């Protein structure tokens, strides 16, 4: 079963955008999932967060929640520390593919 996963970019002035790009290009994520990247790619200086970049990160999380509520992605958006992102997405995807005991 394919699932739709929303991944937020985090603060555009942080490393989130490049981590998301690297994770999607890594070949380590389940190929049968549909990934939606949520959040703008702002023209900003890396490592110099501003109110605008912080607002963009918050807006992306809120957009992800709305996408989930409307059924456009399956579950809450993924917004994780870079070291955990691909592992958490893979394990969440595996749990979605297994029948539940509920």
Image (tube, rainbow, N blue to C red):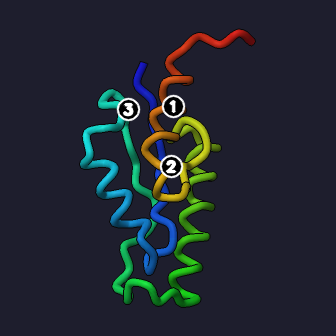
Identify the element where label 2 is drawn.
loop
Where 87 falls versus 54 (above or below)? above
Q: Is 72 left, or right, of 24 in this rendering?
A: right
The numbered dot on residue 20 is none
Question: Marks 3 and 1, how far apart in space?
Answer: 12 Å
From the image, tell me which residue sits under label 1: 91
Q: Position of residue 96 (x, y in %)?
A: 54, 23
Q: Is residue 48 left or right of residue 18?
A: right
Cα–Cα span, label 3 and label 2: 18 Å
Q: Residue at x 33, y 65 (%)?
A: 18
Q: First in sequence: mark 3 or mark 2?
A: 3
- Expressed as whole percent of the image width and height from the top left, the position of residue 87 reads 47, 40
Q: Residue at x 30, y 31 (%)?
A: 31
10 Å neighbourhood of mark 1: few (<14), some, or many (≥20)?
Answer: few
Graded by Cα atoms within 10 Å as few (under 14), some (14 to 19) or many (20 or more), the crowding at tag 3 reads some
Task: Identify the mark nearer the N-term, 2 or 1.
Answer: 2
Q: Quadrant of the N terminus?
A: top left
Q: Residue at x 58, y 79 (%)?
A: 55
Contact between labelled residues 1 and 3, with CB atoms less than 8 Å apart: no
Query: What residue sits right under mark 2 in the picture?
Result: 84
Nearest the viewer among 13 and 56 is: 13
Vertical side of 102 occupied by 76: above or below: below
Separation (CA) of disc 2 from disc 1:
11 Å
Residue 33 is marked as 3
């Amino acid at each position: 079963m394919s699932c739709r996963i929303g991944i937020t970019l985090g603060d555009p002035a942080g490393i989130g955008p490049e981590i998301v790009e690297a994770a999607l290009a890594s070949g380590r994520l389940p190929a049968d999932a549909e990934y939606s990247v949520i959040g703008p790619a702002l023209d900003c200086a890396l490592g110099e967060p501003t109110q605008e970049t912080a607002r963009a990160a918050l807006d992306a999380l809120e957009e992800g929640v709305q996408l989930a509520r409307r059924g456009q992605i399956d579950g809450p958006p993924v917004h994780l520390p870079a070291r955990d992102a691909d592992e958490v997405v893979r394990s969440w995807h595996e749990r979605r593919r297994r029948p539940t005991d509920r």
